[in-house]
Image: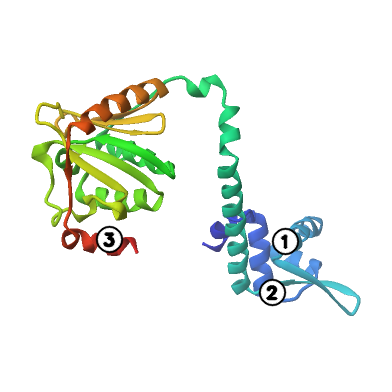
Amino acid sequence: MLEKSLEKIGISAEESRLYLTLLSSGTVSAGALAKSAGIPRPSVYVVLKRLILKGLVTETQQSGVKRFVPIHPDRIADIFSDYKAEIESAEQQYRESLKQVREIVTDSYLSPKLELYESADGLEKVLKDMLLYRDVETEALWPIETMVDVLSPEFFRKHNQERIKRNISVRAIWPENQVVNFKKHPYLGAGSDFKREIRSAPNNIDFSMGYWIYGNKIAFLSSRKEGFGFIVESGDLAKTLRSQFDLVWKRSDEVRTKEDDVKEFIETLK
């Protein structure tokens, strides 16, 4: 278990094994360590040097002989914290330079792409793809009761928690006859806490299939009867569907939620 954890912060299985051997041996010489670990002495020196550079081992001398001391396991938590801080800092720097990165994207990334999914797990993957994004505005023409039936209330509860955490806002249009009972489905509420606006569509709008637009992608989901979904990545298609969505949005009526109906879910966000 410890070896697998240490691999996450760039410590190889070989380094982990030697460190664990040191923990059980205490302060020892390279020769004694090589004997305990069953590793040739020259190899032990190479691995020890890497462990010293990574802060897991320190070097000392006793009676003129080099000896090696493992850090206490409790201090490894500090290494994880430092690693996490470095990753978060690198991510922030990347996000700040993302505009420049997008400018060098080749045309091959801009060409339309299609991913088709079937089965319950596949349909979940369609919507989970959206959670790879942060700080985006999205639009959904969504037969909500049908989608909850297909993917389950628990899936949508977790999906909404993650969506809100990633600051993904949504304008949602639901069929008039599928406006849900918010007491029963508090995770589907509207308002600033939910980062969601909801409107009910005129009853002549076809909702035999739902779609959700995010970035240059559109996620489509069918009913349980047909049981398939797909993601299309196309800037032109996303732009066209957004224009059509805006037309329906203007003709649709606002759906509001009562605070008492959704406060249980809002508490989970805190």
Q: Quadrant of residue 77?
A: bottom right
Residue drawn 59% across the image and 74% down it = 74
* Quadrant in the picture for the C terminus: bottom left
Few, some or many C-alpha atoms within 10 Å of disc 2 (few <14, some 14-19, many ≥20)?
some
Q: Which of marks 2 and 3 precedes in the sequence?
A: 2
Residue at the spot of label 3: 266
Residue 260 place in picture, x, y as percent: 17, 63
Q: Nearer the viewer, residue 168 or 67?
A: 168
- The amino acid type, in three-letter code, at marker 2 is Ser
Q: Which of marks 3 and 1 precedes in the sequence?
A: 1
Residue 158 place in picture, x, y as percent: 30, 52
Residue at the spot of label 1: 51
User: Residue 25, which numbered label?
Assistant: 2
Residue 166 place in picture, x, y as percent: 41, 49
Few, some or many C-alpha atoms within 10 Å of disc 1 (few <14, some 14-19, many ≥20)?
many
Residue 242 place in picture, x, y as percent: 32, 28
Give the Cα distance between marks 1 and 3: 46 Å
Give the Cα distance between marks 3 and 2: 52 Å
User: Residue 159, which numbered label?
Assistant: none
Cβ atoms under marks 3 and 2 closer than 8 Å: no
Foreground mark, 1 or 3?
Answer: 3
- The amino acid type, in three-letter code, at marker 3 is Ile
